[in-house]
Amino acid sequence: MTRFLLLPLFLSVLQKLSALESAVDDVAATYKIEGQVIFPESFTAENGKLSPSRVLVNHDFKHVAFVRKDGSFVVSGIPPGSYIIEISNIDYAFEPVRVDITSKGKIRARRLNLLQPSLVSSLPYPLRLNAVHQINYFRPREEWHLADILTNPMVLMMVVPLVLLVILPKLVNANDPEIKKEMTKTMPQMDVPDVSEMLASWFGGNPKKTKRTTTGNKKRQ
């Protein structure tokens, strides 16, 4: 009878022990990610102090760490897996990196390449994250330039014909006799009727047509 009473008690103790062991294993299976944030020397010299920075894991606030004054940081309580580490700073932008933690606690870091995930570019660990560029929140005002006006299509449509009208007559000297001879040879001679003769033929009578003399030079016999 006592055996049947002790059996449930023994089973409950075993369940509690197994749950305690699993909890201990879960706590022991977490690791930490360490690194250093490096700001430009000009930035630290001008401001005299570092701007507040946070370390985010996988773009959320579940695992967050703050950067110390010397630029170092430690993110604790990280289970095995792959994570994206990025620095949140108001003055400078940092390149995110990928950190892989194995079940045995081995940590490897590499560059984050979303276009070619198979391309592995290893990084040293602990991490050393350099600032990529400074963040500009204001857009500089555009300045006035003469080239902007000259390249305007409306201005080109107005200026180009005017330039052609002014420059082309100067390039072509119409008073040159040689040019006149070439123009008379190249241009065909058309027999254009006189306006007065056309009006006279319309309103009455057939006037005698006068013979037109050609502009060409006649040979002397």
Image: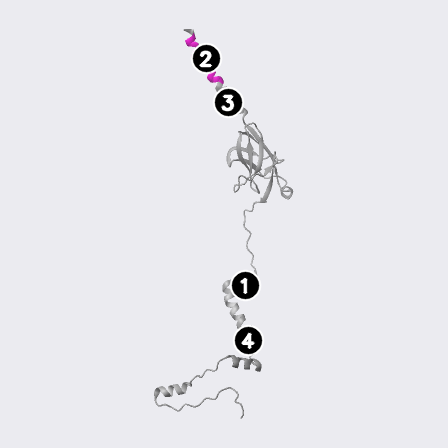
Residue 40: x, y in percent?
63, 42
- Where disc 2 sits, the SS reads helix
> Which residue is tagged 3?
23
Q: Give residue 169's mark.
A: 4
Distance between the alpha carbons at the discs numbered 2 and 1: 94 Å
Q: Earlier in the sequence, mark 3 or mark 2?
A: 2
Q: Earlier in the sequence, mark 4 or mark 2?
A: 2
> Which residue is tagged 1?
150
Distance between the alpha carbons at the discs numbered 4 and 2: 116 Å
The magenta-colored residue range is 3-17
Q: Residue furthest top?
A: 1
For discs 1 and 3, the disc positioned in front in the rendered view: 3
Q: Give residue 182's mark.
A: none
> Which residue is tagged 2?
10
Give the amino acid at mark 1.
Answer: Leu
Query: What residue sits 43% from the left and 11% below the top?
Result: 7
* The magenta stretch spans residue 119: no
Image height of 101 relative to 135, above or below: above
State if disc 4 and disc 1 touch (CB < 8 Å): no
* The magenta stretch spans residue 11: yes
